[in-house]
Amino acid sequence: MAPNPSVESLKERYEAAGQSQVFKFWGDLTPEQQSTFLGQLNSLDVERVNRIWKKAVDVEKELGSGSAGDEEISPLPDDAFDTILGAPDKEKEWREVGIKAIADGRVGVLLMAGGQGTRLGSSDPKGCYDIGLPSHKSLFQYQAERIARLQTVAEEEQGKSKGSVVIPWYVMTSGPTRQPTVAFFEKNNYFGLDKKNVVFFEQGTLPCLTMDGKILLQSKGEIAVAPDGNGGLYAALRSPLSPDNTTHNVLGDLEQRGITFVHAYCVDNCLVRVADPVFLGYSISKQADCAAKVVRKTVPTESVGVVALKGGKFSVVEYSEISKEQSERRDAGGELAFRAANIANHFYTTDFLKRVESFEGEMAFHIARKKIPHVDVTSGEFVKPAKPNGMKLELFVFDVFPYAHHMKVLEVERKEEFSPLKNAPGTGSDDPETSRADLLAQQKRFLQAAGATVGDGVEIEVSPLVSYAGEGLQVAKGQQYSRSGLVESAEELDALK
């Protein structure tokens, strides 16, 4: 029987790329295993893997030698930075611009939701997590209901008919979280959103490599792979939405729907203002092609990356890269000069997202050296190494900042917009308890701002369907609330007096 030409041509291609070791155990595989393995090998751009590895290693060497590590780090220029802190007029003006863009159907939302709740003691996708609110709503549900409320607000304020405003939600999963995420949405009837406006897509993976760039095998007929970092978002936008529909991708879907502005964020922030009209309006008004929402760094020693200039280009500079002197430096107003703490909350034009492909080859992936279980190509034995034996390559979502033509940065109030869920229950910071407390404290402020008095120790959970950011609570004016409870409509506040 003549050999399968596709196998032979693939073998030649991998050999030319110096990666022929992946075929070492081809003869040991059943026809079914060979067919599956062939699909994986065929879908992998092995030449790209080699380019990414070489670029990552070269850049790491440069940084190690100091030739690229001496780039000057400087604070953000005044014309690229603004704040809503103490600026209610600006906030109102930008909100109106953002609401109009939403009402005109020009806004979409990208959610980075590939992570599992492992650190929280859960094997479910992180977005399924319940932080212990009276309603027991998951992070996904809270965000879905904020989208639903904002659609209604935009309709009401812009005189649009009920149900006419749509904010499509693009949910990026990873391989392990895709199926459980979709199942969770289906089980919960998409949290009241129209199924056709919730689009799932998958973060990419890259092969795990030896220290000298050789592809590792997970088994005799499978390459070992790992997620390509949250910066894999950009390539994932170009990938087919499903194996059955290889021509349709997220970028195509955005274009088809006439979406020109995109808000992107991470799933683990319970205070996130999804499709925030203020941030959108700011970015649109400033004609940004890419923008970052930041919060004020609290103290010079806080371990956060900050958005700043590095070598004259916008970057996220890790706290380890900033000297003690720089971290303590103050500007003319007495604030920390390097204070724009990065919270992975971004604005893009759709045109910018399309343009990423043109400079993706210039971005260096980051190397993470790990203990990677694999099949030894010499012995055929499965090895669980005791020390790091290989590397995973990752791109970060902010790695595109240096390539923006019009990068802008907006500072917002931390207590209103940022409470990340990173740690196990009981840790004392960035855990389910702090998320719960921060969200309920915000909702108490919403009621107080509307003119209500809320008793000490009283916890009132105001559904996002009632209020997105404090609006819609006029009935609370002059009222005193002495009972805790959950409010799913403004009228239900009456029962808590």
Image: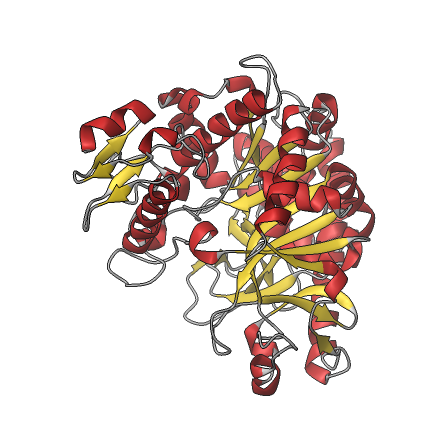
Which picture quadrant has residue 377? Answer: bottom right
Looking at the image, what colour scheme do you see? secondary structure
Determine the residue located farthest toward the front in the rendered image: 478
Classify 271 as above or below 487. Answer: below
Q: Is residue 423 left or right of residue 319?
A: left
Residue 11 at x, y = what percent?
A: 73, 44
> In the image, what residue occupies the spot 58% across and 27% down?
167
Q: Nearer the viewer, residue 456 or 285?
A: 456
> In the image, what residue occupies the spot 43% across and 46% down?
271
Determine the residue located farthest toward the top in the rendered image: 161
> In the image, what residue occupies the spot 41% across and 70% down?
386
- Picture mark count: 0
Query: Can you see residue 41?
Result: no
Residue 302 at x, y = what percent?
A: 47, 73
Q: Nearer the viewer, residue 103 or 200?
A: 103
Q: Quadrant of the C terminus?
A: top left
Q: Quadrant of the N terminus?
A: top right
Residue 376 at x, y = what percent?
A: 52, 60
Q: Nearer the viewer, residue 398 or 456?
A: 456
Classify 24 as above or below 188. Answer: below
Which picture quadrant has residue 313? Answer: bottom right
Residue 410 at x, y = what percent?
A: 63, 55
Classify 235 as above or below 388. Answer: above
